[in-house]
Amino acid sequence: MLERRVVVVVYAGAMALDVTGPIEVFDTANRLLGPSGARYRTEFVSADAPLVRMSSGMVLQASPLEAGQGPIDTLLVPGGWSLANALGDHALVSWIGRAAARARRVASVCGGSFLLAEAGLLDGRRATTHWAYSEAMACRYPEVTVDAEPIFVWDGPFVTSAGVSTGIDMALALVEADHGSALALETARFLVLFLKRHGGQSQYSAVLDAQLADHPPIRTAQEWILDNLDGPLPVAEIARQANMSQRNFARVFRREVGSTPGQYVEQTRIARARELLETTDLTTSQIAARCGFAATETFFRSFGRTLGLTPKEYRHRFQVMSPSGLIDRHHERKGSPA
């Protein structure tokens, strides 16, 4: 295989990052590939060709849908503010269904999974979408098993990802499947991204400040920490999860992660607290409990030492939009997906 053809279906009002995030991953992988690697060739097709205005105002040049004929390696479908209009475009939905039959795999970002489901492609399969619209998707498409937790779900040839930025995680997983973990990791590092946000990681607990290790026992311990962050997490118990002695675990953990287990736990608790402050209305005491701080005062001291702000100050600065930027917290939209 000399190249992998990626066809991106765009429409007026689509979310720009749903499109540009994954294709920047593919482009960077191309630049890092050796001469013998199968490069990605990206094409944009649209019923609104030749110039398609994204929801942010960015204009993308695309070819008509007919230009997407022939074999496709990866069909990519984004979401966006105008998704309700796209769902009502029967010609577009029908084209996606036919194109999927010619594709080795089909991927969606955020609300793009609605378009796949509308085309009947996800019936009997497991899929995800942005957490805010998972109930709407489950109600609209009862034949689809909607899982609101993971950042992306891979079921057969279909890969669906959650909120906008998770399209980047999904694209890195596709690169890893195509070319191996070494290139995917190099791509992530070059883009200053986090490769190891695995698909099963919860949308609600995507800890972006911590890279999972390549060493399997240490990675297992880190994942266990993420799943049990509301508990005390003594080092002896973490070491037991890695099936290692406490002394050897501490030595290997520091070598692989760059910090002690205790430092890593504190960093991860703070990262989770930041997410909850940004995306929920939980009280600081509730957040402290969910993040495993034994007392609210301990949480305040740790948070201030790490960020130089109180939790209240942090929330005031950063609690404006949802993580994906899709929901205005002061004028939350009901009903149809964005």
Image (tube, rainbow, N blue to C red):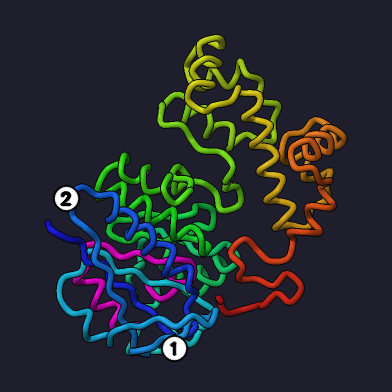
Q: Residues within 10 Å of mark 2 (few under 14, many from 20)?
A: few
Q: Position of residue 214 (x, y in %)?
A: 41, 31
What span is colored magenta in the figure?
93-116
Residue 207 appears in the figure: yes
Residue 242: numbered disc:
none
* 142 left or right, relative to 282: left
Q: Position of residue 253 (x, y in %)?
A: 52, 21
Instruction: Tell me the SS state at disc 1.
Output: loop
* 102 left or right, relative to 160: left
Q: Amino acid at mark 2?
A: Pro
Q: Position of residue 123 (x, y in %)?
A: 35, 68
Q: Nearer the viewer, residue 90 or 208?
A: 208
Instruction: Tell me the SS state at disc 2.
Output: loop
Q: Identify residue for label 1.
A: 88
Q: Identify residue for label 2.
A: 35
Q: Quadrant of the C terminus?
A: bottom right
Q: Residues within 10 Å of mark 1 (few under 14, many from 20)?
A: few
